[in-house]
Image (tube, helix red, strand yellow):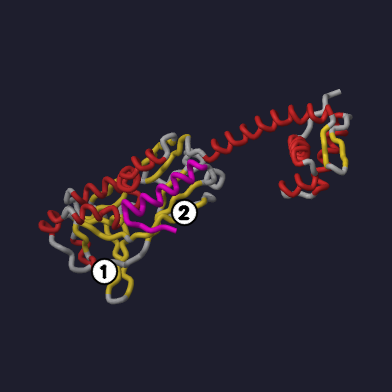
């Protein structure tokens, strides 16, 4: 027959009741009914088959067996408390590896400049950057957090908004000197356009003209497989192309890019999200990285998320 193994909670009732010499005092301290405490001690006495307490008008006192059990119970409960504290600290400690996916452009401009701050804040955290313009599958590709501008896929994800921005047309001053500034959207057909290969050979760009929406389909003379390449091609004078305003801001300030057709910009906001799978979002390392990304979006791009 297996020996009786007491419930640690019942042991805690016993120890505290004897220390306070009262079931009711122990119950008040721990926020439970007196009957809960007394039944716990009854279970111990029944399980061991011995009397552990003496009850009198002066309160509770231990029998010799009860005193021996309480001494051992204090050691056991102390070790359990130490283990619980250690596991709780480990659970809240930001450590381990986080795989973070984004386009190369976003990774270079938004994430990388702020990584030193993340490293100082969480030295036990390891980051794997997966720079790819394709929309990765979080589960299949083992991604903990991904940066996206759309949630239009079949995955059930948890998303945090990092902020909104607009996309505009840009070209280098050199290109515009050689080919001139288009005065209105229809003149784009006379220019070299640079697009992303994922969009196909013909791309439709939206504008506003005279208070109405206007769509212009352009056939690209150059297509790049990543936004980063597209960006570099524009700076190099390859033509006119679409970039997110935060991505182009530094080059505009440096005089390397100029916004094209600004009066016709559609002012359509796009949202940047940090997304993760529901079963990973509660991990402290994922929460820490998501909070970092919100801060990085504000510092690097001036975005304000929710």
Q: Which mark is residue 264?
A: 1
For disc 1, the neighbor class at 10 Å (few under 14, some 14 to 19, many from 20) is some
Among the two numbered marks 1 and 2 on one chain, the one whose residue lies closer to the N terminus: 2
In the picture, residue 26 is in which quadrant? top right
For disc 2, the neighbor class at 10 Å (few under 14, some 14 to 19, many from 20) is some
Residue at position x 81%, y 40% from top? 40
Q: Nearer the viewer, residue 17 or 176?
A: 17
Which type of secondary structure does the marked residue at label 1 adopt? Answer: helix
Q: Nearer the viewer, residue 71 or 217?
A: 71
In the picture, residue 38 is in which quadrant? top right
Give, as a single range, the part of the protein colored magenta.
Answer: 284-306
Above or below residue 237? Residue 55 is: above
Residue underneath mark 2:
160
Tag nearer the camera, 1 or 2: 2
Residue at position x 35%, y 42% from top? 117
User: Considering the image in quadrants, where does the C terminus appear?
Assistant: bottom left
Residue 302 is one of the magenta-drawn residues: yes
> Residue 95 vs residue 130: left or right?
right
> Residue 41 vs residue 182: left or right?
right
Above or below residue 243? Residue 87 is: above
């Amino acid at each position: 027959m297996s020996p009786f193994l007491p419930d640690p909670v019942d042991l805690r009732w016993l120890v505290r009741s004897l220390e306070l010499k009262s079931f009711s005092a122990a119950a008040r301290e721990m926020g439970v009914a007196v009957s809960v405490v007394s039944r716990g001690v009854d279970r111990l006495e029944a399980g061991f088959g011995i009397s552990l307490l003496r009850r009198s008008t002066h309160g509770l006192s231990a029998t010799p067996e009860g005193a021996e059990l309480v001494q051992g119970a204090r050691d056991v409960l102390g070790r359990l408390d130490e283990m619980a504290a250690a596991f709780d600290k480990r659970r809240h400690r930001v450590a381990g590896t986080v795989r973070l996916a984004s386009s190369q452009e976003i990774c270079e401009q938004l994430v990388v400049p702020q990584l030193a701050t993340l490293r100082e804040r969480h030295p036990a955290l390891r980051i794997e950057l997966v720079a790819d313009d394709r929309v990765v599958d979080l589960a299949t590709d083992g991604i903990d957090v991904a940066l996206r501008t759309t949630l239009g896929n079949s995955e059930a994800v948890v998303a945090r908004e990092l902020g909104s921005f607009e996309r505009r047309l840009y070209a280098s001053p050199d290109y515009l000197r050689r080919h001139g500034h288009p005065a209105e959207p229809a003149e784009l057909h006379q220019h070299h356009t640079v697009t992303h290969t994922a969009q196909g050979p013909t791309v439709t760009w939206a504008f506003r003209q005279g208070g109405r929406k206007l769509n212009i389909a352009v056939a690209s003379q150059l297509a790049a497989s990543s936004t980063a390449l597209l960006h570099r091609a524009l700076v190099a004078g390859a033509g006119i192309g679409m970039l997110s305003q935060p991505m182009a801001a530094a080059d505009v300030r440096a005089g390397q890019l100029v916004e094209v057709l600004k009066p016709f910009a559609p002012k359509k906001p796009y949202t940047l999200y940090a997304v993760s799978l529901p079963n990973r979002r509660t991990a402290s390392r994922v929460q820490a990285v998501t909070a970092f990304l919100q801060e990085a979006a504000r510092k690097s791009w001036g975005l304000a998320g929710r």
